[in-house]
Image: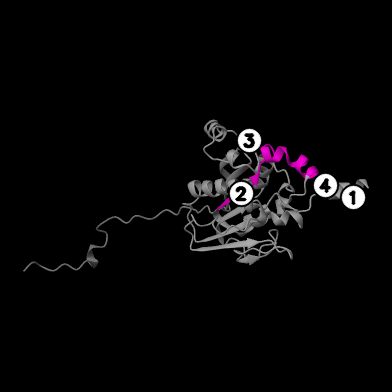
Amino acid sequence: MLKNWYLKYLALSPDSGAMALDNWKGKKFGQYLLDIERQMLAEHCANLAGYRMIHLGLVGDCCALEPFNQLHQFYIRPSNSGLTFDCSSVVAANEDLPLPSGVVDVAIVQHALEYSASPQAVVAETVRVLAPGGHMILCVFNPLGPMGLIKWPMRLATQRPEYNFLSLRKARVYDWLSVLNCQVIGVQNGAYNLPIERAGWLHQDSFWHRICEKVGSPLGNFYMIHAVKRVAGGIANRARAWRPVAAKSYGTKRANINREPFK
């Protein structure tokens, strides 16, 4: 009985129930969260240079890449028999992308880490397909935010799939990026309102939201990390011996100079 209770309420199931996160955008808080993420992407990341751009995640929102100017944009969605996305360009596992190495200029990973069985593998695979100097934007639920703090009570009381996410701290994601030679150049926090399905609580211009944005509170419902892939060039011993150049004095071979008399 204890084993069944654990598997039903506490065990993570990233390959089944959590994949239905796409249906969450129909809820007020889910739409509020996605709107803020889209707004932050447009303000801070829309001007990134590059030709090819990919989007990884469980949110089938085809408007996520609209602010960007990359000519080749496509979505990659996880393969699952019970889930379909209207805006999927490619269906593949996030841990094994069907792309060659170093071909992507910008990668947006929107809530694909915390709903994966191996989030570290997702980060490593995304870094693999990034070109040197490529940009990666990670949108991850904050375990210290309102949604992260009520995750376990909500999982015990309900079976809503959006709460079946892994709690990933910023420092942990920083370590993964550092090992993969990625430099974090910016971190943003957003969506400070409580996850309550009431329209009065979910306004970006609310007093609590404006105060948290003004003081830069790190306790938002999600955090957004902007990292750049750095590839160091190899150091080789290319020391060359300086050979002295024998300088020839002028006028040593005047006999070979043809002079014509002035006419």
Q: Which residue is mark 1?
A: 4
Asked whether residue 191 is drawn in magenta, I would say: no
- The answer to which image quadrant residue 100 occupies is bottom right
Residue at 61%, 42% in the rendered image: 223
Q: Element type at marker 3?
A: loop
Q: Which residue is mark 2?
A: 138
N-term mark: 2 or 3: 2
Query: Which colour style is shown?
Result: one colour
Asked whether the residues under the numbered discs 4 and 2 touch, taking CB atoms below 8 Å apart as contact, a structural biologist would say no
Asked whether the residues under the numbered discs 2 and 3 touch, taking CB atoms below 8 Å apart as contact, a structural biologist would say no
What x and y, as percent, mark residue 23? 67, 55
What x and y, as percent, mark residue 159? 77, 49
Quadrant where the C terminus sits is bottom left
Q: Which residue is mark 4?
A: 9
What x and y, as percent, mark residue 62? 56, 59
Res. 219 mark = 3
Asked whether the residues under the numbered discs 4 and 3 touch, taking CB atoms below 8 Å apart as contact, a structural biologist would say no
Q: Which amino acid, by three-letter code, is at mark 4?
A: Tyr
